[in-house]
Amino acid sequence: MADYLVEDTVKCSECGSRKLNRDETRGEIVCEDCGLVLEDNVIDQGAEWRVFSPEQGDQRARTGAPMTVMLHDKGLSTDIDWQNKDYSGKAISSRYRSQFYRMRKWQKRSRVSNATERNLAMALAELDRMASRLDLPKSIRESAAVNYKKAVEARLIRGRSIEGVAAASLYAACRQCNNPRTLDEIGEASRTGRKEIGRTYRFMVRELKMKIPPTKPEDYIPRFCSGLHLDAEVQSKAYELIAAAQEKELTSGRGPTGIAASIIYIASVLCGKRRTQ
């Protein structure tokens, strides 16, 4: 019997508890507190077969990867397997290998049919490279891909480098997802300069009418503390100091990164874990 806590916003209609258990064997969702059965016909979304190794999973799977905006064709195209085996797993004879090689080459070329798709393929690969270097989550990568595709549809790419627009799209996505990075950080990860990224970012925001929330000092606290190897005590103290400074209007007119760095320094001193300026 496979029971586990249901981690979503569903709550019990009888007692209001959120402690719900899903029984995969019975197909039921039951409240832990009052025992009410909320669902008694839950559909199992998993595979109907069992596997005992990753290789068995690859052989028995009948579906491909999910759609993703991180690929220019959303991952809907297919590839000819490079292992040179037939449907039953037997090796293809040498007579047909050269034919399969040519088919594989032309199939790969056909995935990118025009200049726009070629541009997207290059830009999305660059986005993924920068995001990996900055250790950004999947949600930010996908938001950046959407930003770039909107720029392509609005014909904002002409006269600008792919790297510059991709970096600006990633910078905007970080701010949209409340996980901001500085222009210097994006510039170090990209193949273009800080000034070009900032100029392209402002152009995209204006032309696409993007609603970018202003960055706040507290958005930088967790990352800065992690980089300085400061524990939760210093981080909690930094949040308290920022709240007090904002209440007294001491933060207006100052950059959020500078405020965050200053607050963390003060918090580290107060907690006896001082770091140099």
Image: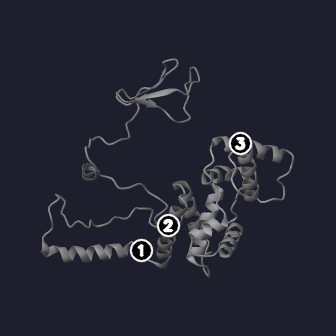
Under mark 3, the amino acid is Cys
Residues at discs 1 and 3 in contact (Cβ within 8 Å): no
On the rendered structure, is 34 left or right of 207?
left
The furthest residue to the right = 248
Residue for point 66% across, 73% down: 194
Tell which circle, 1 or 2, labels the residue nearer the N-terminal end: 1
- Check disc 3 and report the residue beneath it: 271
Q: Residues within 10 Å of mark 2 (few under 14, many from 20)?
A: some
- Check disc 1 and report the residue beneath it: 112
Q: Nearer the viewer, residue 125 or 182?
A: 182
Is residue 216 in view?
no
Q: Nearer the viewer, residue 163 or 70?
A: 163
Tell which circle, 3 or 2, labels the residue nearer the N-terminal end: 2
Q: Name the image colouring.
A: one colour
- Check disc 2 and report the residue beneath it: 129
Under mark 1, the amino acid is Val
Residue for point 56% across, 20% down: 14
